[in-house]
């Protein structure tokens, strides 16, 4: 699959998450505050990026995260409603790049760029001997 045939600049998606205790820094590191952890914010940005393009992928193809350049700008507590956004900004044959952001209300808590690579699931499984 050539991403340029199906994925277009400007495709976008949004996700909403209410921060649970198990996605906080304090959950992973007990002496730290119970605020939304950076890796969890990045995961939401990655999932949102996938949402922006998953419906146009050819059968048997998926995308996986390959690049992350993110800044975590502000904290958000347990129970905060987080909105993540992703918009396609560049499309190569096998790589798609996104502008991503996360918001707690009107406050931007994260921003950056994320890249995803196209993967043929059957070939991947064969290559790594995964059933």
Image: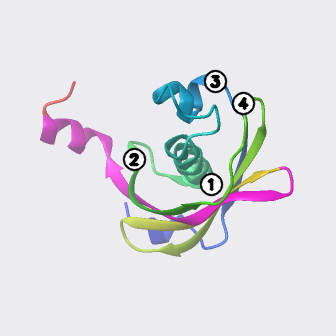
| Highlighted range, magenta | 105-128
CA gap between label 3 and label 1 equals: 27 Å
Q: Is residue 19 above or below residue 14?
A: above
In which quarter of the view is residue 67 placed?
Answer: bottom left
Dot 1: within a 10 Å radius of its alpha carbon, few (fewer than 14), some, or many (20 or more) residues? many
Query: Which residue lies most toward the right here?
Result: 106
Mark 4 in CB contact with mark 3 (< 8 angstroms): yes
Q: Sequence-wise, which precedes: disc 2 or disc 3?
A: 3
**Residue under numbered circle 4:** 78
**Label placed on residue 117:** none
**Residue under numbered circle 3:** 21
User: In this rendering, which labeled residue sits more in front, label 1 or label 2?
Assistant: 1
Q: Position of residue 117 (x, y in %)?
A: 37, 58
The one nearer the camera, 48 or 59, is: 48
Q: Residue at left 19%, top 29%? A: 130
**Residue under numbered circle 2:** 61
**Label placed on residue 52:** 1
Mark 2 in CB contact with mark 4 (< 8 angstroms): no
């Amino acid at each position: 699959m050539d991403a340029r045939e199906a994925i277009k600049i400007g495709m976008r998606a949004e996700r909403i998450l209410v921060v649970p205790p198990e996605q906080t820094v304090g959950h992973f590191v007990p002496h730290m505050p119970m605020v939304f952890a950076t890796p969890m914010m990045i995961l939401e940005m990655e999932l949102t990026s996938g949402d922006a393009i998953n419906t146009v992928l050819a059968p048997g193809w998926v995308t996986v995260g390959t690049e992350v350049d993110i800044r975590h700008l502000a904290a958000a507590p347990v129970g905060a409603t987080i909105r993540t956004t992703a918009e396609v900004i560049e499309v190569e044959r096998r790589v798609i790049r996104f502008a991503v952001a996360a918001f707690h209300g009107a406050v931007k808590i994260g921003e950056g760029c994320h890249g995803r690579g196209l993967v043929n699931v059957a070939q991947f499984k064969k290559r790594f001997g995964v059933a």
